[in-house]
Amino acid sequence: MQYTVHDFETAARAKLDPVYADFIAGGARDEITVRANEAAFGRLQLMPRVLRGSTERDLDIDLFGGRASLPVLLSPTAFHKLVDPEGELATARAAAAAGAIMIVSMASTVAVGEIADAARAAAGGQAPPLWFQLYIQPDLEITEALVRRATAAGCSALVVTVDSPVLGAGERNRRNGFHDLPPGLRCENLVDLRDGERGHVRQIAMSPELNWDHVDWLRRTTSLPILLKGVLHPEDARLAVRYGVDGLLLSNHGGRQLDTVPATLELLPEILAAVAGRVPVVVDGGVRRGTDVAKAIALGASAAGIGRPVMWALAEGGEKGVRRLLELLRDELDDTLALCGASGLRDLTPDLVRVPTWGPAPGPVAAPGADNRFGGVIA
């Protein structure tokens, strides 16, 4: 039985091919940022209020016209069929049953239309909130075809990854020689994107030339809400608002792109100050507990995203595993709110979070000397 996210990780590692386990867990270079993401949550302390009891806690959120019953998003992760035969279909059904928003990866091993159908069926015929992750391709016609495909499937927002002009250096993958999907698997969203194509699968192309003009082009191309994923600098956050972006997913790609960038939680106050309430900000990277979700929301995030935990749960138990994971996080978050004297997410305010000024970081620890704005240098 799994009682924590880390239990799922342990169980998944026992089942998975070590090459695939490394693909999920690994990050760029020395993986300093991978460790820092989780450690940042451990440094923050909760300061509960008392005698403010309520019999129920409201965990609902509204984002871009879609209502979710859990402020935990499934951040885009690729290749779910590497770890479970049903792949993204199982993940989508679990997310829909939990009332959580799933962001479909452009590199999913099931087509977005099929994922949407599975989510709709699991939600009893309702259309649960489903977003689509997009890498803007050098060929804008292909990009537009992807947008049309996601729109036709019923996706209600586009999450545009902008931190990948080139592919990050995942040294575990290099050592393991993992470069391609095994036979029988492919990125289904990249099949037959031009009229007349039959069975042609494109590769995701990184775009070193990507710039704000591309964001402007996309804004004119689609009426869907656009979130940028991977903005870390406050000035870029201000530019995003200026270019008509509807939201930000504050993410460092789980430490898989540029190593030694700060933990996303550390950057959250600066990004929120930069956007000044004009767009919602979701944060991912290192979320492993309901207390982590509560801390992010207390600091001002609209929701928190999880990536690797979804893959671990899927590998451990398929759809049931992902359902169990989301139930665990829901229960942990509900308990956290009750113990903090909060009747709902609206009661999670910055005064409930304390930055310690003494001692080493509790919990997971980053590499020696890693900078942490929540209390100086991590020992």
Image: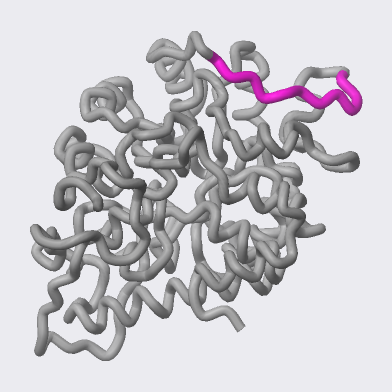
Principal SS element in the magenta part? loop
- The answer to whether residue 26 is magenta is no
Q: Position of residue 28 (x, y in %)?
A: 50, 35
Q: Position of residue 292 (x, y in %)?
A: 33, 63
**Is 307 rendered above or below residue 208?**
below
Image quadrant where one finds the N terminus: bottom right
* Quadrant position of residue 52: bottom left
Q: Front-most of 109 and 159?
A: 109
* Quadrant position of residue 259: top left
Q: Position of residue 56 (x, y in %)?
A: 30, 85
Magenta residue span = 197-207
Evaluate whether residue 120 shows in this view: no
Please name the residue shown 51% across and 49% down the image: 75
**Is 70 rendered above or below residue 274?**
below
**Is 116 rendered above or below residue 27?**
below
Q: Position of residue 32 (x, y in %)?
A: 40, 41
